[in-house]
Image (cartoon, helix red, strand yellow):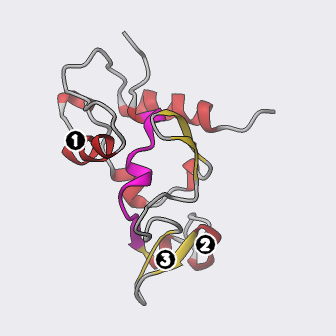
Amino acid sequence: MSELNPCMTCGACCAYFRVSFYWAEADDAGGCVPASQTEPLTPFLRCMRGTNNRQSRCTALVGDIGDGVSCSIYENRPSPCREFAMSGENGVENDACNRARAHYGLPPLYKDMPFHTGLDAATLASSELQSPPN
């Protein structure tokens, strides 16, 4: 049984969906998301740079989809990224996750797959994965 939910190293969602959020989440407006990683959508919305393209891929995503990716701004990611549920967490599948995975030829993640990493444990494990070497 894996201790880390495969969602934490997949990245398909980061390279499939537009990540839009309220403009004030950016650090130039008092939030924590690096403004240099965003672009304006409307007077009230921004998106992560690269996710508003036809071939979407967040510029904060590092690595190859489905093969050990990481987020270069993980601790400062915007609310849509924080709120996107890991598929299989608490026994619930995330259909959006599975659509993104299918786009990249990856198998779906099911609620009864042999991983049981909760959000707190996965966040801790991911922050360890995301942290730059000392």
Q: What residue type is labelled 2?
A: Ala
Asked which quadrant contains residue 2, the reply is: top left
Asked which quadrant contains residue 34, the reply is: bottom right
Instruction: Give 96 or 43, whichever is nearer the viewer.
Output: 96
The magenta stretch is: 8-21
Left or right: 102 as drawn, with respect to 6: left
Residue in view at x 40 percent, y 68 percent: 54
Left or right: 69 as drawn, with respect to 18: right
Label 3 to label 1: alpha-carbon separation = 28 Å
Residue in view at x 46 percent, y 60 percent: 78
Mark 3: secondary structure: helix
Mark 1: secondary structure: loop
Residue at the right extreme, as displayed: 134
Q: What residue type is labelled 1?
A: Asn
Q: Which of marks 2 and 1 is in front?
A: 1
Which of disc 1 and disc 3 is earlier in sequence?
3
Residue in view at x 22 percent, y 41 percent: 94
Left or right: 27 as drawn, with respect to 40: right
Disc on res. 35: 2
Which of disc 2 and disc 3 is earlier in sequence?
3
Q: According to the image, label 1 marks what residue?
A: 94
Graded by Cα atoms within 10 Å as few (under 14), some (14 to 19) or many (20 or more), the crowding at tag 1 reads some
Q: Nearer the viewer, mark 3 or mark 2?
A: 2
Q: According to the image, label 3 marks what residue?
A: 24
Which of disc 1 and disc 2 is earlier in sequence?
2
Residue 12, how many percent across, how many down?
A: 40, 45
Label 3 to label 2: alpha-carbon separation = 10 Å
Tell me if label 3 and label 2 are in contact, CB under 8 Å.
no
Instruction: Tell me the quarter of the image containing the N terminus.
Output: top left
How many numbered markers are drawn? 3
In magenta stretch: residue 28: no
